[in-house]
Image (cartoon, rainbow, N blue to C red):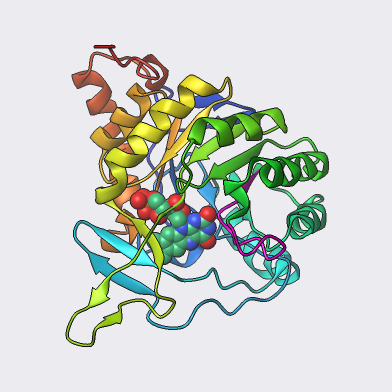
Amino acid sequence: MNGDRTPAIDNRLEVSAGGLRLANPVMPASGCFGPELADVARLGPLGAVVTKTVFRGVRSGNPAHRLAEVASGMLNSVGIPSLGVHRFRREILPSYRRLGAPVIVSIGGLSVQDYWDVAEELADEEFAAFEVNVSCPNLEHNGLEIGSTPRELERVTRGVRERAGGRPVIVKLTPNVSSIGLIARAAEAAGADLLTVANTYLGMSVDLPDRRATLGSTTGGLSGPSVKPLVMRLVWQTVREVGIPVIACGGACTAEDVAEYLVVGAVAVQVGTANFTQPTTMSEIVAALPATLDRLGARTVSDLVGTLVSA
Ligand SMILES: Cc1cc2nc3c(=O)[nH]c(=O)nc-3n(C[C@H](O)[C@H](O)[C@H](O)COP(=O)(O)O)c2cc1C
């Protein structure tokens, strides 16, 4: 543990939603923060920590280049390398637990059965919740993202729910759909306790002198400040479509960004790309939140949730 991790828990920041109890509404987005960064980042109390997505077997990820900087954002095609669920259990999960915040384990799969197997393998471990990353290609359905088809999403969610050992199941939606409401309702109907909105937007960029795609796998996922207004709309819409709590994820960098997401109805916010540019971002947001609440005339975080004034 880091000696700087001393700030007292402020009960104005507490969140209780969908079976999760969090000291504050801030947590890392999956794949954007690992235990190895905890000391560098002078990690204060976080609401939770979310692991990088774990798959059933070993995956090596996509060809280089895997990251590209674009205007106010980042394109990535990491392809989620994974050591597989057995090594995750033995070697990786314990290091997340040592961070002292509730651990949310992100699981992925290349088929519906993959998700079920990973959930089953981890069911006896100690952690707070599953986050189901449904932005993975379904190799049984032409490589379409599992989360873009309500039927497949429902099968994944229902099966993970059955194997979750009573823990909350969070489904992390893909933004690459024409109706987020349809997909969100499918996840809720299949037993999701919370939703995370959203994973990255599909995109690409070109290296002009070479006339090649910048990323080794041609397309990738866009994240960072440029996606915040897009995700804001998705969160706002999702909250109106479902009765379960929503965690926002997209472009958050400051306490004001977190407050905006709370106002449109999110109960908590994940921080992704901002951790790469400034590893202390999450701790700085948590430290700034009480003053942000004061400025907005709110006593607690919950006082802000869903308070958007309609036009
Ligand atoms: C380098 C990188 C790796 C990522 N890895 C994962 C992952 O393993 N699982 C997942 O669900 N999302 C992953 N994501 C998506 C983020 O969790 C998040 O949904 C997205 O970046 C949007 O948030 P942001 O704009 O705050 O970065 C990754 C994103 C980046 C940039």
Magenta-colored stretch includes residue 138: yes
Q: Is residue 273 above or below residue 300?
A: below
Picture coordinates of residue 194, whole percent (x, y): 59, 32
**Residue in the picture at 46% in, 40% down:** 178
Magenta span: helix, strand or loop, mainly?
A: loop
| Residue 31, visible in the rendered structure | no
User: Quick one: which residue is furthest to the bottom in this view?
Assistant: 210
Residue drawn 52% across and 49% down?
49
Q: Nearer the viewer, residue 241 or 14?
A: 241
Question: For this view, does 112 lie left or right of residue 83?
Answer: right
Q: In which quarter of the image is the C terminus?
A: top left
Closest to the observer, 285 or 11 = 285
Camera-nearest residue between 256 and 225: 225
Residue at x 19%, y 20% (from the top left corner): 295
Q: Is residue 67 shown above or below 13? A: below
Residue 102 sits inside the magenta stretch: no
x and y, in percent, of residue 248 in the image:
42, 37
Rendering quadrant holding ligand 1: bottom left
The stretch of residues the image draws in magenta is 130-144
- Residue 143 visible at all: yes
* x and y, in percent, of residue 82 in the image: 61, 71
